[in-house]
Amino acid sequence: MTSDCETVVVGAGVMGLAIAAALARSGQEVVVLERETDFGTVTSARNSEVIHAGIYYPAGSLKAHFCAQGKQQLYRYCEERQIAHCRTGKLIVATRDDQVAELASIQVRAQANGVHDIQRVSADEAQTMEPALSCKAALYSPSTGIIDSHSLMVSLLGDAENNRAVLVTRSPVDGISPLSAGQGYELTVGGENSMQLSCQRIVNTAGHGACHLMDSLRGFPDTCRPKPVMLKGNYFRLAGKAPFSRLIYPVPEPGGLGVHITLDLGGHARFGPDVEPVDTEEYSVDPARCEQFYSAIRHYWPQLPDNSLTPDYSGIRPKLNWQGQPYNDFLIQSPKDHGCARLINLFGIESPGLTSCLAIAAYVQQLCNE
């Protein structure tokens, strides 16, 4: 039996496009299926656009491993392809005396992850770097930066298409059936004109839909199926000139990295994200949440003017609950993990997924060759 294509990548966010580019470059015939009307319009379009250094993640985690690799690869890729980016640097600030000890723990964790350029700075040194800042002490990460994520995705899609990969939008995958004798899969692709598509291999990078996609696959073991947990993060934009030239992050809080300030490549500032548990994908920003932002920001920028924040956008972190417990790492499954031939799942690809995309793509390519 012949299949319609060799590999189907489900989901055309930054991760799906990076994987499609890597597989197509290696000579595979790749079709990318995307349920939306364009690529990269969901999680990949709703984040801080930060190139992370790899500071916070537990040593030995996939997040720590792929972020450390991916950061260097992403900077090189941006320089080679002339994708807009900037090594802004980042200050992680303790605003209370009881947070100062936590900076030492963060520095130790960062160094264990290979982030050796992180530096401890005093309050005076931090305020010399950023005069508007108020803090007790800080850590400085010079290798943190920002990127034009849309331009990155345009470049990755170009790489994939230059190697004969095909992107098909408005194509949600409604069901998957294994073909006989491990010959691959048949996908029911919905949309305006429902059709059947057969392939030898599936790479599931469907973001918020990645867990649900496995619900449709007969024979996929329940023990390997995580449950999605959605945490919404809201962003507010600052009117007027940005007060800082670097990213400013507070000491992390449960569920996220705290309400921090990031810059876009035009020099404008936005604050966020906060942490809001949600049950559905809904992206409006409640203006009433603004009051919590003022309170959090004024811990490190007391001069934040009244009425200077306006709702900007929101994103939803695709977190996981697995085996009855919160799971805070990337979860990448190969046939060795779940027993389904030629199926690779990427679950829980939240931050630092953007930073890690090229490193994870190279890893998935290796899995496909095994």
Image (cartoon, helix red, strand yellow):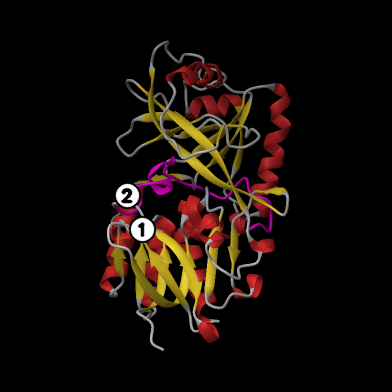
Q: Please name the residue shown 40% across and 55% down the image.
A: 13
Q: Please name the residue shown 62% across and 51% down the image.
A: 227
Coordinates of residue 27 in the picture (x, y in percent): 36, 81
Q: Is residue 233 above or below residue 167?
A: above
Marker disc for residue 150: 2
N-term-proximal mark, 2 vs 1: 1
Per the image, label 1 sits on a secondary structure element best described as: loop
Amino acid bearing label 2: His
Coordinates of residue 344 in the picture (x, y in percent): 53, 69
Coordinates of residue 206 in the picture (x, y in percent): 46, 57
Q: Please name the residue shown 56% across and 78% down the image.
A: 341
Q: Is residue 46 magenta?
A: yes
| Quadrant position of the C terminus in the picture | bottom right
Q: Quadrant of residue 314?
A: top left
Q: Quadrant of residue 336?
A: bottom right
Residue found farthest to the top = 306
Q: Is residue 170 above or below residue 241?
A: below
| Magenta segment main secondary structure | loop
Q: Which residue is mark 1?
A: 34
Q: Please name the residue shown 47% across and 27% down the image.
A: 130
Q: Tell me: 297 left or right of 18.
A: right
Marks 2 and 1, how far apart at CA: 16 Å
Of residues 271 and 340, the one drawn nearer to the viewer in this rendering: 340
Q: Tell me: 105 left or right of 331.
A: right
Of badges 2 and 1, the one in the foreground is 1
Crowd around label 1: few <14 · some 14–19 · many ≥20 (10 Å): many
Residue bounds of the magenta highlight = 38-61
Q: Is residue 142 above or below residue 122?
A: below
